[in-house]
Every structure is written in structure tokens, then in C-alpha cells.
């Protein structure tokens, strides 16, 4: 995990702090300051959580607090040094050279601190992290992390503490802090918002170069006003449809626009950074999803994002790339990342290789004042982190009323979902949003249905005609829940089956240990049932797409098309044909181009 960790906003001077750290559990939570932690009995491999085999610890017991310690060599120079954390579950406090530098709450989002002023002149630096993560707290966003000691049903082992990359970055005192790139294909424009950190001085200029391959699309320079730049860059409209399509991003042709930024002051180059964007739109019209203004059939796979030895942390960046290649090879054009905010490398590879992604907020499981505050804070950080990725085409703040269990009866729960839906649309008006996926819809751009009926004939009878869909929406209750809250207008919304399937197939000796919605006894039976189920779903025209459960077996939930170590359970060619079914042409897959070059694996700063 030592490749550059933020590939959609890169600089050259950085250093990974992944690797061996000193480690200690603090189950009694008796230490409040690192000076009192005098014993470090364990060694952990960051960024793997202590519950995982890859961490070197592999302890899945309850541990509400743990401590990390690492020394590194870095001379204090003329530039600022930023310490970045990809994600620490759940609350982190950080010290550098015994000086407290800050804290962060939220287990799935990044945070950073400027550590320049507390760095030692000797060049030897020490960073200490305290991670608090109450394993029994159901009022915090925790996704699929089990609150019981051993995983049960559809919940998995816990992830405590650091689980994404820790790294250092060197920047000038005045530098580009944040970049927002918003494609507007209706106007053939790209919106650019840049935010500058440091003193507000006159004469700052931002140069922005946009290229596809060697073709320059734009090269502009803007005055920085109050440390911000807000511009729309107009591109030359190719006019002819074929030429326009060459510049548009899709799973079949994921064209990326490389963006180079330079921050200047009086002909002195202060900062350089590189990013990318794409010309892509994602909307709904009537009963269809539109990609770049054209109907596009979504064939999604539910992706839990776990690995046997590393849990939520990918073993390496190549593992994420391989997952996307397997998903596409199986005939799908997208995934719904389920109850997890994935490592940023995943979204990078989805951008490069061409994969539609639905991003979903990990759920809390109690409705309290604190849980609502936590979800709102962390969800806005999620959107802020990932808004520039063209692969993301849907935001999903809630799933199956988890965290809002009385959604059908209580207005406060309904207002919570509606508020998150409208906040999402406010922060990002360019993408659709499902307020609560699965059932009990009260604010949404798409009516998502979770239906694990394993009889293809029943599914066809239920959903094939527009005449009976109204009855289904008002009377049918998958999971015992109404599909739409009473009084919420849903009849004009597009409809999609966003969870179905869930067929379990494992070795007969393991059958009593695993869980699934239905089961197959042999590989041949599994393939036969999948083919018949997909044939039925592909024939239901009222759906604008589907999401099959699920990508891989995940601990005791053995519903995967692939095993936990990513081996297909039957011929992948047969899988592809069944997935595409009768709807070939609605989201056809082709090979993706080679990704743009990355910086070296690591550069000393």
C-alpha cells in the first residue's frame, strides 16, 4: 500500500508512513496521554487493522482503545509538512514529538494536520496515535462491522484504528489546498474551483492545463481572489456526434482529461499538482437512467469490499484493480459499494478502467441525536473527498432503513432521510441520490427495490407490465416493508431492482457454516439458477437496471459469484452471457485504455 494515496490530486514530494509501528491495546482506557503509555508490547503493520492477519496481530476481541507509535527521519526545511490519515476508526487523537496536534471523529474519511511547527530540529520525529472505537456503540456509522463478538448473519468482523494509508506531504506555505472539478456536458464546459491555503496576498495566479493524451483542450491562467478561483472552462464542442463521443467518459470508453495546475506569484512557482476529470453526466429521465444524455442500462454487482486476510483494507492497489477487472469480465458495468467508503484507489481505478459506482454511507443502527450528527458530518466529508470521481454516478445515504428503523411511522425518521437527501443534492447537484435504498422510500431520484424472491417466474409476473407496477409499489412488501412511505409521490420515479439473487454455493462440508438467501448444491445448479434468474431480470423492461447480490463470498455470507479469494464459481464466460442477457446493447462492455502514468511508488521528501 505504498503507491501514491490520492491519485486524483497528486504532488511529487511525499513519503509513506505505512509499515511497522509499535502498538498497544488499552482495554481499560486508562491512558489519556502518550507519556503514560510506557509499554509497547506489540508490533503492527499499518495500514492493516489489528483484527486482521496481515497486521501481524489478528486479535478480534473487543478493544475500545489502542495506541500506535512510529518514528521517522525528516529534516525540517523551508516548506510545510502535512501529515495525512486516510481513515482511522473511529476517533483519533494525534501527537507529534509529544505535542498534541489534533483529533478527528469518523471512521471512514480522511484528515490531516500541518506538523511543521512541532518537528524536531534533529530530524528524528515521533508520531503517536490514540484510536477510540467502542465496539458496542450502535449510534455511530459502522456499516457491516458486527457489534457481537463473533460475526453473525450479514455482519462481519470489526475494524479498529488505522485502516488506510498514513503519509506525509511537503507543500509551500501558500499552496493549493482543495480542487473541485465539475463537468457540464450540456454546455461543453468544466467547472473549476480551487481553494488556496496560506496568507492572502496579491498577485497570485493559477495556471490550468487540460489535455486528453497530447491534445490540449484548454490552457488558461486566472487571478486568485481571496485565495479562491471559481471559473468555467469552455471547451471546443466537436459538433459531430462521433467526435463528441470520443471525449465522453463511459464504462465502454473511459476517456479522462488530465489536469495540470500551477500556482504562481510574481513569476515564482509556488505549487504544482495534477488531477483529472471527465466529460460525463448522470441523470434520470422518465423511467430511464441517462449516461451522457443517452439511456443506459445499469448492470451492477453488490460489492462489500472485504478481503479474508485484510478485511476492509485492500491487500494492495492491484487488488482493487483486479476486482474491477473481474466485475467487468463477468458482464457488469458497475458496482454498488455496500456499507463502505472504499479506499480512494478503488475510485481511481474505476475512473481509469470504466466502472459505474454507487457510493453508500455506512449505517448506524440506532436513531439518536448523536447518530444523526455523526452521519451528517461524515457523509458531507465523504462527498467532499469523492466528488471529483467521474465513476461515481449515485449517492446513497441510507440502506434499508438501517439507523432509521421507524421510518414508516415516525416523522422524525422521515425528516432525517429527507434532510440527508436534500443536503446531498445541495452539495452535489450533478448526481442523483437515493435517500433510502430498498424500501420505505421518502426522498429519492430512483425507487430501489430489494427483492430476494428466488423464483424467476414470480419475478416476471410481478414486474413485467406497467399495469401492475402500481399495485406492486402499494401492496407488495419485500422484507415486510412498504416500498414507499404513505403520502410520498413515487408513481413517476424510475424503478430498479437494487438487490436480488443472493444464491449461496459452497463446498458441501461448509454449508452449515454459511448464510445465504437461497442455496445451490452444485456448481452446475448454481450456474443454472443464476442464468434463469438473470434471464428473468433482463426481460423486465420496467427496470432501468439491476444490482445482483453479490460480488464475492464475505466471511459467513457466501452469496458471491466469486469466492472470497476471487475465484469464479462457474465459467466466467457463461457468467458474462447470463449477466448481459436479452439486453445486449444496453451498456455493452469493451476493453479499457491503459491508465495514465502515475508518479513513482514513493519519493523521499
Image (spheres, rainbow, N blue to C red):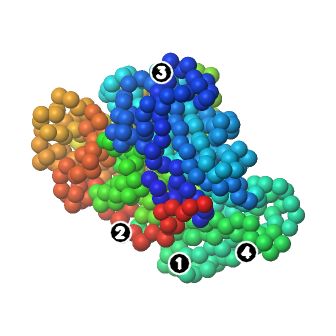
- In the figure, 219 relative to 71: above or below? below
Badge 4: residue crowd in 10 Å (few <14, some 14–19, many ≥20): few
3D distance between C-alphas at marks 1 and 3: 54 Å
Mark 3 or mark 2, whichever is nearer to me: 3
- Nearer-N-terminus badge (3/2): 3
* Cβ–Cβ under 8 Å for marks 2 and 1: no
Q: Quadrant of the C terminus?
A: bottom right
* Cβ–Cβ under 8 Å for marks 4 and 1: no
Pick the front one: 227 or 159: 159
Q: Is residue 258 left or right of residue 399?
A: right
3D distance between C-alphas at marks 3 and 2: 52 Å
Secondary structure beneath dot 2 equals: loop
- In the figure, 271 relative to 124: above or below? below
3D distance between C-alphas at marks 3 and 4: 56 Å
3D distance between C-alphas at marks 4 and 2: 34 Å
- Nearer-N-terminus badge (4/1): 1
> Which residue does the numbered mark 3 point to in the structure image?
27
> Which residue does the numbered mark 4 point to in the structure image?
220
- Nearer-N-terminus badge (1/3): 3
Secondary structure beneath dot 4 equals: strand
* Identity of the residue furthest to the front in this view: 122
> Which residue does the numbered mark 2 point to in the structure image?
590
Secondary structure beneath dot 1 equals: loop
Amino acid at each position: 500500500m505504498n503507491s501514491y494515496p490520492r491519485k486524483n490530486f497528486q504532488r511529487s514530494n511525499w513519503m509513506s508512513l505505512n509499515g511497522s509501528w509499535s502498538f498497544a491495546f488499552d482495554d481499560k482506557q486508562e491512558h489519556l496521554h502518550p507519556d503514560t503509555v510506557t509499554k509497547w508490547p506489540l508490533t503492527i503493520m499499518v495500514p492493516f487493522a489489528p483484527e486482521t492477519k496481515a497486521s501481524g496481530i489478528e486479535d478480534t476481541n473487543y478493544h475500545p482503545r489502542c495506541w500506535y507509535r512510529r518514528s521517522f527521519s525528516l529534516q525540517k526545511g523551508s516548506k510545510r509538512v502535512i501529515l495525512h490519515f486516510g481513515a482511522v476508526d473511529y476517533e483519533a487523537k494525534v501527537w507529534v514529538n509529544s505535542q498534541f496536534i489534533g483529533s478527528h471523529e469518523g471512521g471512514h474519511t480522511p484528515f490531516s494536520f500541518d506538523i511543521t511547527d512541532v518537528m524536531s530540529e534533529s530530524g528524528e520525529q515521533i508520531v503517536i496515535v490514540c484510536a477510540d472505537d467502542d465496539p458496542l456503540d450502535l449510534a455511530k456509522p459502522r456499516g457491516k462491522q458486527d457489534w457481537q463478538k463473533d460475526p453473525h448473519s450479514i455482519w462481519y468482523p470489526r475494524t479498529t484504528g488505522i485502516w488506510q494509508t498514513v503519509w506525509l506531504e511537503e507543500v509551500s506555505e501558500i499552496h493549493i489546498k482543495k480542487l473541485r472539478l465539475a463537468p457540464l456536458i450540456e454546455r461543453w464546459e468544466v467547472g473549476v474551483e480551487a481553494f488556496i491555503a496560506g496568507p492572502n496576498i496579491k498577485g497570485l495566479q493559477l495556471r490550468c492545463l487540460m489535455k486528453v493524451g497530447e491534445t490540449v483542450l484548454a490552457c488558461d491562467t486566472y487571478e486568485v481572489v481571496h485565495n479562491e478561483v471559481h471559473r468555467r472552462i469552455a471547451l471546443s464542442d466537436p459538433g459531430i456526434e462521433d467526435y463528441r463521443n470520443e471525449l465522453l467518459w463511459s464504462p465502454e470508453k473511459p476517456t479522462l482529461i488530465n489536469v495540470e495546475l500551477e500556482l504562481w506569484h510574481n513569476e515564482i512557482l509556488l505549487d504544482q499538482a495534477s488531477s483529472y476529470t471527465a466529460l460525463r453526466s448522470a441523470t434520470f429521465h422518465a423511467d430511464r437512467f441517462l449516461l451522457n444524455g443517452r439511456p443506459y442500462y445499469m448492470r451492477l454487482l453488490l460489492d462489500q469490499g472485504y478481503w479474508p486476510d485484510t478485511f476492509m483494507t485492500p491487500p494492495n492497489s492491484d487488488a482493487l484493480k483486479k476486482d474491477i477487472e473481474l466485475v467487468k469480465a463477468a458482464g457488469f458495468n458497475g458496482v454498488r459499494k455496500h456499507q463502505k467508503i472504499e479506499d480512494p484507489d478503488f475510485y481511481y481505478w474505476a475512473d481509469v478502467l470504466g466502472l459505474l459506482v454507487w457510493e453508500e454511507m455506512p449505517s448506524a443502527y440506532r436513531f439518536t441525536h448523536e447518530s444523526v450528527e455523526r452521519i451528517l458530518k461524515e457523509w458531507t466529508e465523504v462527498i467532499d473527498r469523492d466528488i471529483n470521481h467521474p465513476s461515481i454516478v449515485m449517492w446513497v445515504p441510507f440502506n434499508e432503513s438501517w439507523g432509521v428503523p421507524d421510518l414508516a411511522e415516525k416523522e422524525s425518521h422521515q425528516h432525517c432521510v429527507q434532510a440527508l437527501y436534500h443536503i446531498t443534492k445541495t452539495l452535489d447537484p450533478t448526481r442523483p441520490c437515493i435517500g433510502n435504498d430498498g424500501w420505505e422510500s421518502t426522498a429519492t431520484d430512483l425507487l430501489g427495490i430489494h427483492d430476494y424472491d428466488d423464483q424467476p417466474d414470480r419475478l416476471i409476473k410481478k414486474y413485467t407490465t406497467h399495469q401492475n407496477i402500481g399495485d406492486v409499489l402499494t401492496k407488495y412488501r419485500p422484507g415486510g416493508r412498504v416500498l414507499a412511505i404513505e403520502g410520498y409521490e413515487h408513481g413517476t420515479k424510475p424503478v430498479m431492482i437494487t438487490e436480488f439473487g443472493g444464491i449461496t454455493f459452497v463446498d458441501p462440508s461448509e454449508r452449515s457454516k454459511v448464510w445465504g438467501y437461497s442455496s445451490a448444491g452444485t456448481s452446475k445448479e448454481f450456474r443454472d439458477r443464476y442464468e434463469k434468474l438473470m434471464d428473468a431480470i433482463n426481460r423486465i423492461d420496467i427496470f432501468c437496471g439491476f444490482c445482483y447480490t453479490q460480488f464475492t463470498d464475505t466471511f459467513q455470507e457466501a452469496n458471491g459469484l466469486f469466492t472470497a479469494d476471487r475465484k469464479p464459481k462457474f465459467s466466467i464466460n457463461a457468467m458474462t452471457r447470463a449477466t448481459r442477457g436479452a439486453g445486449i446493447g444496453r451498456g455493452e462492455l469493451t476493453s479499457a485504455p491503459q491508465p495514465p502514468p502515475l508518479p513513482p511508488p514513493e519519493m523521499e521528501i
